[in-house]
Image (cartoon, rainbow, N blue to C red):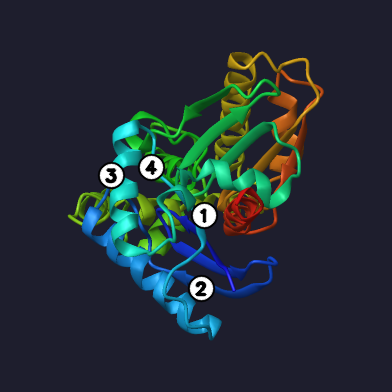
């Protein structure tokens, strides 16, 4: 029996899925985050632990996988790719080096929710990233360079805007917003200026700020103007990423699908309606993917069975 491994390694969690050669899923396990940019030691450790738990859950004796596909957040350069491959090779046994596929995590999303070979992929979770491939096989990215250089419309970006809106509301530098009270309640503090003692504390980072994005959803449901503007701007930024990729690949007038995934799209804000209004590719269809990206990784790895 040939066993297939798919892994989605992200900034929030790592998901491993094992299937047999017929594509039957034997185990799906969620483990700790595997962020190449944060800690190479934890990256390798968390992937190895998650895969080992999946092997145990599968009930199979798996000494090595016939094929494996990894989608890894933060793999944006050739150096990133080489380092990630080195670490993964030390954590997981695959029958042949050629049967170990490694991609930026945007590339495993499309096969999870679309059978089309070309189109655009959007990830808006803790971070954000945009990837596209056209009918000629040309590829390009937009964003995806982490929170200092990009990450617009991500959970982190929304959470950061919530914090700033709360401080501006408290200072009187911005419009009064219920985000101020929601933030004070969230942190159990009496005044917005006390936030400095929390957010600048060592260890308080991107994932913590991304968690705050849910306050924008809460305020939006209560018709808060500032929260609505933050989410509207997020929709605009998602469209900007899509537009940039479509323009680079000369796809603006073509028919294609846009597969979008990530926690941001779980918001009650109608991103599925708002994003297309800002898009410059009128013939494209936005699909909010409701499947796990790891399913796409398994599909890509399964293709190697037919190439023996």
Residue 140 seen anywhere in this rendered image of the structure: yes
Q: Which residue is mark 3?
A: 83
Image depth: mark 4 or mark 3 in front: 3
Point out the residue furthest to the left here: 202
Residue plotted at (52% across, 83% down): 60
Q: Position of residue 184 (x, y in %)?
A: 39, 58
Which of disc 3 and disc 4 is earlier in sequence?
Answer: 4
Q: Tell me the element at label 1.
A: helix
Which of disc 4 and disc 2 is earlier in sequence?
Answer: 2
Distance (Cα) linking label 2 and label 3: 24 Å
Residue plotted at (40% across, 51% down): 97
Q: Which residue is mark 2?
A: 29
Closer to the camera in the image, 157 or 197: 157
Q: Which residue is mark 4?
A: 74
Specify few, some or many for label 4: CA neighbours under 10 Å numbering under 14, 14-19, or 20 or more.
many
Image depth: mark 2 or mark 3 in front: 3
Point out the residue furthest to the bottom here: 59
Which of disc 3 and disc 2 is earlier in sequence?
Answer: 2
Which of disc 4 and disc 1 is earlier in sequence?
Answer: 4
């Amino acid at each position: 029996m040939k066993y297939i491994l798919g892994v989605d390694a992200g900034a929030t969690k790592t998901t491993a899925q094992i299937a047999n050669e017929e594509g039957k899923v034997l185990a799906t396990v969620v483990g700790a985050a595997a962020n190449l940019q944060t800690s190479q030691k934890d990256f390798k450790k968390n992937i190895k632990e998650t895969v080992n738990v999946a092997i145990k859950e599968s009930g199979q004796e798996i000494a090595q996988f016939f094929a494996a596909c990894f989608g890894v957040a933060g793999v944006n350069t050739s150096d990133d790719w080489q380092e990630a491959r080195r670490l993964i090779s030390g954590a997981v046994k695959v029958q042949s080096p050629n049967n170990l596929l490694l991609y930026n995590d945007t590339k495993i999303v499309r096969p999870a929710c679309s059978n089309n070979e070309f189109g655009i992929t959007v990830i808006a979770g803790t971070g954000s990233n945009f990837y596209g491939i056209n009918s000629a096989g040309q590829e390009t990215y937009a964003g995806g360079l982490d929170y200092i250089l990009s990450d617009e419309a991500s959970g982190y970006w929304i959470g950061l805007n919530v914090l700033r809106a709360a401080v501006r509301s408290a200072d009187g530098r911005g419009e009064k917003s219920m985000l101020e009270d929601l933030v004070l309640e969230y942190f159990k503090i009496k005044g917005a200026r006390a936030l400095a003692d929390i957010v600048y504390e060592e260890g308080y980072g991107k994932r913590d700020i991304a968690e705050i994005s849910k306050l924008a959803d809460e305020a939006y449901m209560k018709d808060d103007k500032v929260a609505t503007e933050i989410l509207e701007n997020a929709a605009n930024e998602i469209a900007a990423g899509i537009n940039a990729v479509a323009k680079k690949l000369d796809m603006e007038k073509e028919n294609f699908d846009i597969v979008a995934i990530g926690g941001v799209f779980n918001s009650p804000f109608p991103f599925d309606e708002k994003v297309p209004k800002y898009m410059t590719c009128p013939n494209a269809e936005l699909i909010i993917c409701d499947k796990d990206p790891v399913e796409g990784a398994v599909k890509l790895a399964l293709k190697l069975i037919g190439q023996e």
